Image: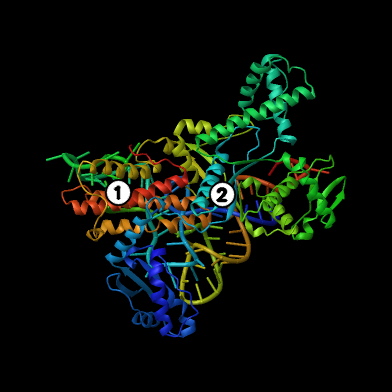
RNA sequence: GCGCCGGUAGCUCAGUAGGAUAGAGCAUCAGCCUUCUAAGCUGAGGGUCACAGGUUCGAAUCCUGUCCGGCGUGCCA
């Protein structure tokens, strides 16, 4: 689209000027049906009211004023009720291929975000358990978004926010303690009702015993504190290990606790009080969100004196603002949706520009096998962890599957399909295209040619041109994926590239006696390879040279 | 009750800021390997876009209402 538009826009504007039209936006789109041209515009429809004429007549007068190079544009036709369809010529595509080739390894990179800083917060799981599929989706979306911004030239902070104080971590300590006693001392020791029922608690209890023996048997604050620390460390170690398997490395781990120790929680409380936005009722401190346009007020400090999660969330986001980011992105699961308006509204009342915050909410993941849903209940503890899944289907498949759907729809993870080590698995389709190209280059080594120069004008078959058409969309795909924050857009694009390449490969032989043609086709394959490599890098999937 | 997300082929999902004959993968059926990797290519069947109204040259897409599913709606995070 970028290349099409760059070429077409001036031509159309010139034509419209002749008709004394200047205040209309020239919009182009790629028709879903290639029979309607490479690019199409509905501009004639948009002008019907202003010109009081039929779309067809308007289209005709626009066309008759167009001046263009016949080698670049083959044909401009009026079709349908008044669409102007543009058919590009071979030379246009050869020209684009040259431009793509010149970008070499940097193909698809931008400088849009140069000098700008973005913070992407993802995963952010408290160290009270293992990662499961939902966390995995969050992690893979977040990492892909972070990669995209890096590709656009931004300076990216990959952040993980966690809380190792408060209620949840106490529940963890109590759960571990109960299992510890149950295994080694009293088989029928009661397990807390609100405890974590997962099997991993047994594992922690066993590791705890091998470190401390029976020294923690007595239930007192000191021992529980030791257990708490042990459990937290244990969980974090596991979480980081799992993330590492997914090639996810974050560079800031923000501990909620730090907000208290440096007084940032108190600071926020003071500001709210000063601005008259908070008040006391029933021994608790409330935030007057109803004065700010929301439905109801919320407690920010419980009557026990502990803050609710909302208060540190607000303080944390204030901290991010104060660190001077141009863009703040939060990746949340749909279960966190309730807090978003509260936090944003509060920040606005503090004078921050909340349009800089982009909250991405993804829906849940379900796991299915043989058409049956596998229940992932926390209650029974028989949950399927992200590690289990990685063991079973591998890193590439997990990363790919967890982002291949729009983030706003539920994602069904089909274990059978994921396990499939064959053409049925969509991951391999992409990787295979890359491996094929690598293998061609390997084979081409045996033919003694000078690869530096190639006459791209020798290209021109239907399949070659179609491949170039697919390749020239890479930048658009990256932009669109980032703009919409929908990683699956990039995946869909890469699938098209792979498909178009496979068809080209099937129909046009690359390695042949005709060395000049071969060189040109190798250039085409080279650009394809780089786009697949870069695309796969962004989504965190490997690009194997052999399969 | 209220808020957010979803309802499109047998299944899982796309549908590009309202466009032309609604698409893909899987599944089903039928073809293509003595030539660069068949993890590939080619073809066929398969649809009341949940339902009902509305907006306009034009609606799967926007608006209203209804039905169904998920997630929220805590002095849990």
State the residue in front, A72 or A491: A72
- Which of the two residues, A134 or B3, is positioned nearer the viewer here? A134
Please give the name of the residue rendered at 49% of the width and 82% of the height, measured from the top-left corner: A49
Q: Which quadrant of the figure has residue A370?
A: top left
Taking depth in this image into account, of A206 and A268 the one nearest to the observer is: A268
Residue on which the image places disc 1? A502
Quick check: A49 left or right of A383? left
Position in image of residue A83 (x %, y %): 38, 73
Total number of numbered labels? 2
Q: Quadrant of residue A430?
A: top left
Q: CA separation, marks 1 and 2?
A: 35 Å
Q: Of label 1 and label 2, which has the lower sequence position?
A: 2
The answer to whether residue A176 shows anywhere in this view is yes
**Mark on residue A347?**
none
How far across and down, in percent of the image, does residue A383 sit? 57, 32
Tell me the chain of label 1: A
Q: Quadrant of the N terminus of chain A?
A: bottom left
The answer to whether A28 is drawn above or below residue A162 in the figure is below
Q: Which residue is mark 2?
A: A156
């Amino acid at each position: 689209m970028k290349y099409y538009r760059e070429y077409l826009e001036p031509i159309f504007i010139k034509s419209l000027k002749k008709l004394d039209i200047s205040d209309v936006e020239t919009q182009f789109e790629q028709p879903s049906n290639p029979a309607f041209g490479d690019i199409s515009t509905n501009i004639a429809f948009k002008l019907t009211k202003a010109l009081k004429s039929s779309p067809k007549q308007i289209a005709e007068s626009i066309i008759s004023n167009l001046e263009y190079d016949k080698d670049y544009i083959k044909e401009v036709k009026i079709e349908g009720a008044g669409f102007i369809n543009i058919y590009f010529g071979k030379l246009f595509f050869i020209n684009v291929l040259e431009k793509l080739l010149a970008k070499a390894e940097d193909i698809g990179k931008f400088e849009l975000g140069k000098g700008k800083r973005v913070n992407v917060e993802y995963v952010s799981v408290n160290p009270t358990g293992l990662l499961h599929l939902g966390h995995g989706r969050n992690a893979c979306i977040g990492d892909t978004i972070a990669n995209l911004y890096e590709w656009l030239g931004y300076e990216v902070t990959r952040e993980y926010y966690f809380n190792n104080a408060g209620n949840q971590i106490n529940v963890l300590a109590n759960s571990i303690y109960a299992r510890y006693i149950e295994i080694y001392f009293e088989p029928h020791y009661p397990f807390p009702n609100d405890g974590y029922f997962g099997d991993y608690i047994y594992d922690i209890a066993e590791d705890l015993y091998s470190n401390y023996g029976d020294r923690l048997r007595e239930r007192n604050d000191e021992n529980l504190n030791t257990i708490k620390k042990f459990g937290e460390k244990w969980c974090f170690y596991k979480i980081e290990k799992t993330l590492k398997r997914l090639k996810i490395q974050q560079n800031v781990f923000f501990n909620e606790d730090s907000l208290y120790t440096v007084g940032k929680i108190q600071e926020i409380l003071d500001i709210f009080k000063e601005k008259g936005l908070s008040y006391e009722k029933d021994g608790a401190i409330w935030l007057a969100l109803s004065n700010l346009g929301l439905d109801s007020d919320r407690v920010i400090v419980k009557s026990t004196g502990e803050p609710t999660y909302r208060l540190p969330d607000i303080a944390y986001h204030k901290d991010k603002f104060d660190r001077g980011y141009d863009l703040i992105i939060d990746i949340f699961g749909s279960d966190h949706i309730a807090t978003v308006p509260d936090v944003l509204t509060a920040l606005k009342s503090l004078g921050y520009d909340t349009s800089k915050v982009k909250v991405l909410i993804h829906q849940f993941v379900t796991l299915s096998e043989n058409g049956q849903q596998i229940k992932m209940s926390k209650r029974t503890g028989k949950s399927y962890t992200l590690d289990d899944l990685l063991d079973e289907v591998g890193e590439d498949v997990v990363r790919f599957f967890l982002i291949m759907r729009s983030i706003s729809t539920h994602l069904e993870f089909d274990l059978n399909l994921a396990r499939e080590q064959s053409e049925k698995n969509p991951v391999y389709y992409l990787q295979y295209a890359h491996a094929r190209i690598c293998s061609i280059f390997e084979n081409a080594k045996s033919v003694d040619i000078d690869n530096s120069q190639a006459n791209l004008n020798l290209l021109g078959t239907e399949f070659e041109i179609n491949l170039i058409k697919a390749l020239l969309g890479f930048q658009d795909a990256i932009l669109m994926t980032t703009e919409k924050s929908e990683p699956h857009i990039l995946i869909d694009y890469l699938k098209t590239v792979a498909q178009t390449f496979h068809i080209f490969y099937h129909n046009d032989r690359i390695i042949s006696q005709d060395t000049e043609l071969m060189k040109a086709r190798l250039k085409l394959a080279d650009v394809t390879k780089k786009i697949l490599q870069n695309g796969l890098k962004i989504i965190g999937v490997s690009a194997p040279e052999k399969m």
